[in-house]
Amino acid sequence: MIMIDTPESASPVASSPSLDTVDVVIVGAGFAGLYALYKMRQCGFSTRVFEAGEDVGGTWYWNRYPGCRCDVESIHYSYQFDEGLQQDWVWTERYATQPEILAYIQHVADRFDLRKDIDFNTRVTAATWQDQEACWLVETGSGNKVRARFCIMASGPLSMPNKPEFPGLGTYKGDTYHPGLWPHEGVDFTGKRVAIIGTGSSAIQAIPLIAEQAAHLTVFQRTANYAIPAANRPLEPGELDAVKTDYPALRAKGKLYPTTIPADPAGPSALEVSEEERERIFDEWWQTKGLMFQATFADLMYNDDANALVSDFVRRKIQSIVDDPDIAAILAPKNSFGCKRMCVDTDYYKTFNRDNVTLVDVSEVSIDRIARDGIVIGDTTYEADAIIFATGYDAMTGALTKMDIRGKNGLSLRDKWHEGPASYLGLAIHGFPNMFIINGPGSPSALVSMVTGAEHHVDWIADCMTHLQDTCSHSIEAGKPAEDAWVVHNREVGAASLRSACDSWYLGANIPGKPRVFMPYLGGFVAYDEKCKQVVHDGYEGFEIA
């Protein structure tokens, strides 16, 4: 039986315990960690990166499930710090697949010779602030300890898989998988009965391809999600060249938009156009815009009546695609459009017209247990040779609280965040000097292009560290009043949007016992960037510098 592997089970590098000293330790070698390493080098800081995987890539190293691809267009989901890199790399599709994105990240590591400062197969288990020495003591699973003046957490907001403990799982005789821990050699489901639990983003991408291969696929859905056609396609000859003629201008334009992706709505309100015109616009954006369909009108996420119109449109689309009206009714979401992270798909709804696909609604009658031969609900056993647990991630905070992080006076991050994550700008935490988070809770994070958000954070952090050097200051941390005010502001902005209108991983609702707090910053990149700049302009207002 193949059980779910986990990032923490990666084989540690064999070495005797040691104690080295560097200026900066970076945790994670995905998009954020690689750019942080590059930038720290540029600033002259000695740097060490710890990465649990065998190579660079982060999310794109671990997620290799069928159909895995980005939902942000390739030309936006890429680095912009080096013009030569922008000009040389050739994307082949509008939305790149996981193998292409991983190849891109590996190319970046090679191009800038980044691997020599990265310890692979090495998981950080603890980081403790040393009050007297004013530095971090970072410990790894291999037994190494490293002292560092600064600690940058590039561990990712969606990197800690959620693996619910279903009763009886240990008795199951088949193979089990999680999309975020997919076997690197791939999986052949030919002739097998496959069950998949969950219908979030990963499942929606994987289900059509698994259904084509498996003898039978049974899908267990607790909550129906809105899925928009990806409208993916190969990039036309010359299309990428046209972008490259003035890539910097496109990047600058993106930073003037809340999501960092240039997309002007068709109008300010879905309520201000005729029904015929609204339907025409919805249909056009449905066919062509991919994830940006959610921005068709500016008020879709803020006005109940406008949201009801787009919600009804998508439900009618599902009814027109799915042949069985009873199945279509189960697949039609009941919550507000956009309150969960929007999914993009290729033939997802059409897959439920296949004879070898069964949809099981577990919204009211839940899974009782996992038995030797499959999944049990009441008196029914759904036999399966393999089960895929597409149960998501402990988002935003999971990778951080997995480590034993202790700040001043031994303060535990887990204890500090017991009632929900608190930070200033999503960058720094009161009581944890010289520690920075990239795309952390309280920052735009997953609500913008993650690569753009990571570069923005790294640049801000690098400037801050350089400022400390230039002023002979030894530490900086978020002040308590500023942190409290930012937490209140973040929650107020989140409450103003319909994104907070239902249970989702945005609020930690997929993790039992996790506090219900809207974690990403919903004020948009433009407002967030202005705030970050203003803080610096005002002498790092809200921070305590020693």
Image (tube, rainbow, N blue to C red):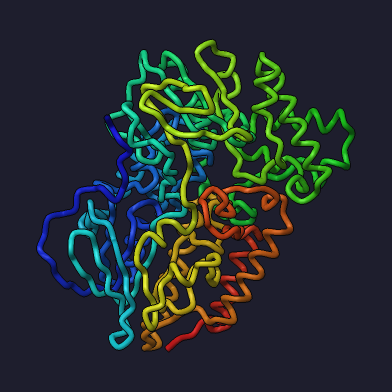
Q: Residue 257 placed where, x, y %? A: 64, 53
Q: Give left or right: position of 190 versus 449.
A: left
- In front here: 235 or 319? 319
Q: Residue 41 placed where, x, y %? A: 30, 66
Q: Give left or right: position of 113 versus 195.
A: left
- Residue in view at x 74 percent, y 58 percent: 496
- Residue in view at x 30 percent, y 34 percent: 183
Please determine whether, in this image, residue 535 is positioned above or below residue 495. below
- In front here: 210 or 262? 210
Q: Kindly indicate the quadrant of the structure image that contains residue 214.
A: top left
- In front here: 432 or 451? 432
Q: Residue 70 placed where, x, y %? A: 48, 38
- Residue in view at x 56 percent, y 29 percent: 345
Please determine whether, in this image, residue 106 is positioned above or below residue 353. below
Q: Residue furthest front?
A: 379
Examine the rendering and report whether any part of residue 465 can be seen: no
Q: Where is the C terminus found, in terms of image quarters?
A: bottom left
Please determine whether, in this image, residue 339 is positioned above or below residue 381. below
- Residue in view at x 62 percent, y 44 percent: 340
Q: Give left or right: position of 470 versus 336.
A: left
- How many marks overall? 0
Q: Kindly indicate the quadrant of the structure image that contains residue 136.
A: bottom left
Q: Residue 487 placed where, x, y %? A: 61, 70
Q: Residue furthest left?
A: 16
Examine the rendering and report whether any part of residue 455 can be seen: yes
Q: Kindly indicate the quadrant of the structure image that contains residue 461.
A: bottom left
Please determine whether, in this image, residue 375 is positioned above or below residue 263. above
Q: Where is the N terminus found, in terms of image quarters?
A: top left
